[in-house]
Image (tube, rainbow, N blue to C red):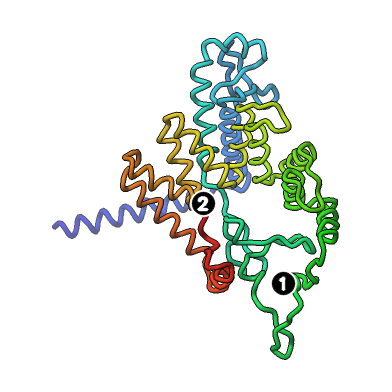
Amino acid sequence: MDVACRVSETNKMSSSDSCKDSASKLLSNDTICEVNNKMQCMSTADKDNEDISICVNCGKEGDNINKLKSCTACKLVKYCSRECQIAHRPQHKKECRKRAAELHDEVLFKQPSPEDDCPICFIRIPTLWKGYTYKTCCGKTICIGCALAPVYDDQGNEIAEVKCPFCRTPAPTSDEEIVERYKKRVEAGDVYAMYSVGCYCKDGMPGYPQDQTKALELFHRAADLGYAKAYNNIGYEYEVGTCVERDMKKANHYYEIAAIRGSSSARHNLGSKEEEAGNMDRALKHFMIAVGSGYSGSLRHIQKLYSDGHVTKEDYTKSLQSYQAYLGEVKNRERDQAAASFGGEKYRYC
């Protein structure tokens, strides 16, 4: 009896489905197009409703034609005019500053992109300056392992003449030739050359008389092209006040830009300043990011903070793991051999 009922119900369902199929076949092409057009209009209307916004001060609605402007600091509210923004400022100021600070920290405490790969071995270039070298002939930054690796001719004989491992240009033989090559690289818009010449002018290196103003000008040129270390040097100039008026607010501003763009030394400096101010949580964040970028000085600093009871064992363990991960990305046999030629000083340690 139950089986018969189930069979009957199945037949009814099949009959119903058959009726639906038949009804759908009766729809004309015009009807189908009309339905599709209605659905498209509904979708467009929904999208337009999403674009509609309201001025938080006067309640005026905006649309695709009369768009409202968001608060540039917090992006939380919108205004129809500057007058409404000014009028609403006393009510919005506290919330705005809080959200603006949150947005700022989201950018500031983001792990920056790693250093570029060596153009020869295609392994990540070490962060420490001892781990790479800049070639004034072609403007390439090459890891120390590839820079000092022996070069052989077609017969397998080692070539005694020192040449660039990338473009095979003979190495410069005088300070004058080095200065001339740097000059050409600066004229070509090479940011590393601008930064390097700025450092030479700052310290008064051979071929470059000491000129703090010229150095700062070159740092700004390199910074405008996005070079992180140039921002760091500008920050330092404002901190010490050598050729500009001392201004710690501007110094921290440039340090933050440098850290965001990947300068691990600027990141470490920010961490140290937060530590001095007693903000241990923010200091640890900076140090951890610097460690992830290969700055071993920050690792040693976290170790000291752990010994002094300012950070947990878990935090210290994470920093060690992060640094080991960095070493795994930059280490290879040729680089260790190159480091050994410098008296055993490892390229990966500060």
282 versus 74 height, above or below: below
User: In terms of secondary structure, where does tag 2 sit?
Assistant: loop
Question: Can you identify the residue that label 1 sits on?
Answer: 165
Which is more toward the observer, 235 or 21?
235
- Image coords of residue 145 (percent x, y): 61, 70
Instruction: Please state which amino acid type lies under the numbered disc 2.
Output: Tyr
Which is more toward the observer, 289 or 155?
155
For the point 61% across and 34% down, the residue is: 44
Q: Residue furthest left?
A: 1
Q: Earlier in the sequence, mark 1 or mark 2?
A: 1
Query: Which corner quadrant of the image does residue 267 belong to?
Result: top right
Q: Count how many numbered circles sit on residues in the image.
A: 2
Question: Can you identify the residue that label 2 sits on?
Answer: 295
Query: Which corner quadrant of the image does residue 322 belong to?
Result: bottom left
Left or right of residue 1: residue 292: right
Query: Which corner quadrant of the image does residue 324 belong to?
Result: bottom left
For the point 56% across and 15% down, the residue is: 56
183 versus 247 height, above or below: below
For the point 57% across and 56% down, the residue is: 128
User: In terms of secondary structure, where does tag 1 sit?
Assistant: loop
Instruction: Please state which amino acid type lies under the numbered disc 1.
Output: Pro
Q: CA distance from mark 1 to mark 2?
A: 27 Å
Q: Are marks 1 and 2 in contact (CB under 8 Å)?
A: no
